[in-house]
Image (cartoon, rainbow, N blue to C red):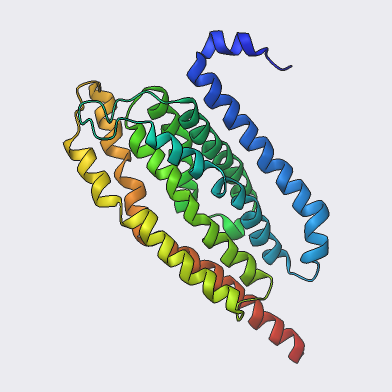
């Protein structure tokens, strides 16, 4: 039974309601994309792909949805924050845009967690840990008005996943020798550096220099225990991801050649 919106607003508050609605819609949209891809599109464009390839393709096709939506909401929400005010930059309240960006991102990650648990090909401990921490602490930080600047930055960085997943789609469809594959790979590397690496020193400066006066001791501990984690993952996750998908692809090619020899 669906709860009426006024009841949800009264129980959770307006901010939590917007975030929860965006979370729910994002999770549902990801599931719909999964069904559409598997039922209508994959049988046409990937009919001759292996079962493993179909898992990677499915994961990447659905993952384009949050990469093409949440970061653009987050960028607009960042402009609405008092970034230059060190007294309030880390204690600013979220705007509706910020709530929708965070909800959309977390809803997709909830879906992707289920998908990864169901498919060993994409079940990586680092990815699952990243998703679970984000699902827990992004809403906590947003609704507590704690370090929203950092949360929105991390949501913005998801735009680089466009290049990552287009690369996997091209690879699994057999276009790894195409010019498009090369151009996309270069663009992905550049976007990763510009979006994720280049702004990181500024974010660390903000984290170190801005006021934490509004934070409780628990808030402060949670913030400094979790905020550095995505920065660390940024430094080595893409090479690992590229290596895993490439190794899987090469293993399948070798198996195919061995089968032909028989």
Q: Residue furthest left?
A: 209
Residue situated in front as seen by the camera: 135 or 205: 205
- Quadrant of the image occupied by residue 227: top left
Residue found 57% across the figure and 73% down from its top: 181
Residue found 52% across the figure and 26% down from its top: 19
Relative to 9, is 207 on the left or the right?
A: left
Q: Residue furthest bottom?
A: 261
Can residue 113 be seen at all in this image of the molecule? yes
Q: Quadrant of the N terminus?
A: top right
Give how far across and how far down residue 138 sits, in percent.
43, 34
Seen in the picture, residue 217 relative to 260 is either above or below; the reply is: above
Residue found 18% across the figure and 39% down from its top: 208
Give how far across and how far down residue 153 sits, in percent.
38, 43
Can residue 239 be seen at all in this image of the molecule? no
Q: Quadrant of the C terminus?
A: bottom right
- Quadrant of the image occupied by residue 111: top right
Residue found 44% across the figure and 52% down from its top: 126
Relative to 229, is 180 on the left or the right?
A: right
- Quadrant of the image occupied by residue 24: top right
Relative to 119, is 50 on the left or the right?
A: right
Give how far across and how far down residue 82 sits, in percent.
30, 30
Give how far across and how far down residue 158 sits, in percent.
48, 49
Q: How many marks?
A: 0
């Amino acid at each position: 039974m669906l709860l009426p919106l006024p009841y949800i607003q009264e129980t959770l508050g307006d901010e939590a309601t917007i975030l929860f609605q965006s979370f729910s819609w994002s999770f549902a949209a990801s599931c719909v994309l999964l069904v559409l891809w598997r039922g209508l599109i994959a049988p046409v464009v990937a009919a001759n792909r292996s079962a493993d390839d179909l898992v990677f393709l499915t994961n990447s096709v659905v993952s384009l949805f949050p990469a093409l939506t949440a970061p653009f909401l987050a960028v607009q929400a960042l402009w609405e924050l008092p970034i230059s005010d060190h007294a309030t930059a880390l204690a600013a309240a979220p705007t509706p845009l910020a709530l929708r960006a965070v909800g959309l991102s977390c809803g997709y990650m909830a879906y992707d967690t289920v998908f990864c648990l169901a498919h060993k090909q994409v079940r990586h401990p680092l990815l699952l840990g990243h998703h679970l921490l984000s699902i827990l602490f992004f809403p906590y930080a947003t609704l507590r008005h704690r370090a929203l600047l950092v949360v929105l930055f991390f949501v913005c960085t998801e735009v680089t996943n466009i290049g990552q997943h287009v690369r996997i789609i091209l690879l699994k469809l057999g276009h790894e020798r195409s010019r498009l594959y090369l151009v996309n790979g270069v663009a992905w590397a550049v976007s990763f550096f510009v979006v994720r690496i280049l702004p990181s020193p500024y974010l660390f400066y903000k984290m170190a220099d801005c006021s934490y006066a509004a934070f409780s001791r628990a808030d402060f501990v949670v913030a400094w225990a979790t905020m550095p984690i995505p920065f660390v993952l940024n430094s080595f996750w893409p090479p690992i991801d590229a290596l895993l998908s490439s190794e899987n692809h090469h293993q399948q090619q070798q198996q195919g050649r061995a089968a032909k020899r028989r």
